Amino acid sequence: PLRSLPLHWPPPRSTALSRTACMVAGAAATTGEDDSSSQISEWAKQESLVVTKGPHVKVAGKTLNPCGLFICILTMSVCACCYPPLLLSYALSRVFDNKKRRMVDYIVNIWAKMSMLLCTYRPKVTGLEHLPHTDEAFMFIPNHTSFLDIFSMSGFVPRRMKYISKIEILRIPLIGWAMQFAGHIAIRRMDRRSQMQTFKDAITTLENGNSVVTFAEGTRSKDGKLKKFKKGPFKMSSKAGVRIIPVSICNMYRWMPSSALLPVAFPRQVEIKLHAPVETAGRDEAEVSKEVFGIINRGLPPYQQAAPGAVVW
């Protein structure tokens, strides 16, 4: 039943829980475990989070409903309101702080946070103790299921960050322009030369004291589960000599599955888990990748975890 949660109408409550109970009890009988009651309770909790599309249309094969359209209009409106201070911050940053552009970062933070709060969405953020009170640059590596991952990280993680984002995002009016003003890094995924330039830009950005966010899966997960990683982020981290902070973004997939053009509902019960930094200095990149993958995977809810034995890269 969990596999069909995101876009299916919820089955009758008793039927759903009965089916869940049977599955868990069967698993417990097979493994000899006696904690099936706690698992049933957890799965029942998952059942209560079923998200339905409601009235909707299909745009380019993707679901679009009134809630998603409202979130889009609201986000663009807040962005437009932020443009006067954004342009002023950009002009001052180019003169006084071109390597970091912190003033622009703060405006982007305000924009992302205001947009999400006006949508009555505020994720729970745990693991803040893993962020030192210094300006140390990190490579943040979260799992990726939605463009709301970027809004969530930018608005609610208290660290100014640059993103490695596909070039199409940076071309979006207002939103993409703001990302360019802040010094975010573009990549053309199918262009080898662009990938090499992105690699160099990311290392320069890290060496300039900026934290960078990159989605090591390379693209959004189609089913919400953690996918194998690309090698690039780990080579960048090793080359720049920075530590990696693994991030588990939990339950976002429910609110914007891959079949949706925009969120199908206002997100609820989303959690951002910041894990302890992983050292990269003097370590094999494949080993680091495997460790980061495991940390992120263990932090995700069961329905988002990679299958046992999944290939890391």
Image: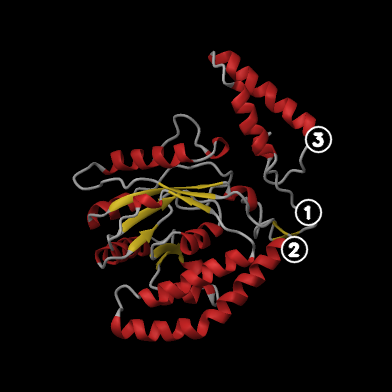
* Amino acid type, residue under disc 2 in the picture: Pro
* Amino acid type, residue under disc 3 in the picture: Pro
Residues at marks 2 and 1 touching, judged by CB atoms closer than 8 Å: yes
Q: From the image, which quarter does the N terminus lie in? A: top right
Q: How far apart are marks 3 and 2 (CA)?
A: 25 Å
Disc on res. 12? 3
Quadrant location of residue 27? top right
Q: Which of marks 3 and 2 is nearer the N terminus?
A: 3
Q: Distance between the residues labelled 1 and 3?
A: 17 Å
Q: Which of marks 1 and 3 is nearer the N terminus?
A: 3
Which residue is rendered at x = 39% and y = 46% of the image? 275
Q: Is residue 192 visible in this depiction of the protein?
A: no
Q: Which element carries disc 2, helix, strand or loop?
A: helix
Q: In this view, does 58 lie above or below 222?
A: below
Which residue is rendered at x = 58% and y = 64% of the image? 116
Residues at marks 1 and 3 touching, judged by CB atoms closer than 8 Å: no
Q: Which of marks 2 and 1 is nearer the N terminus?
A: 1
Could you say where residue 158 lies in the image, as x and y percent from the top left?
Answer: 41, 61
Disc on res. 215? none
Of marks 1 and 3, the one in the foreground: 3
Could you say where residue 127 lies in the image, as x and y percent from the top left?
Answer: 41, 48
Quadrant location of residue 47? top right
Disc on res. 66? 2
Which residue is rendered at x = 42% and y = 36% of the image? 311
Q: In this view, does 239 lie above or below 197?
A: above
* Amino acid type, residue under disc 1 in the picture: Gly
Quadrant location of residue 20? top right
Q: Find disc 1 in the rendering and name its residue.
A: 54
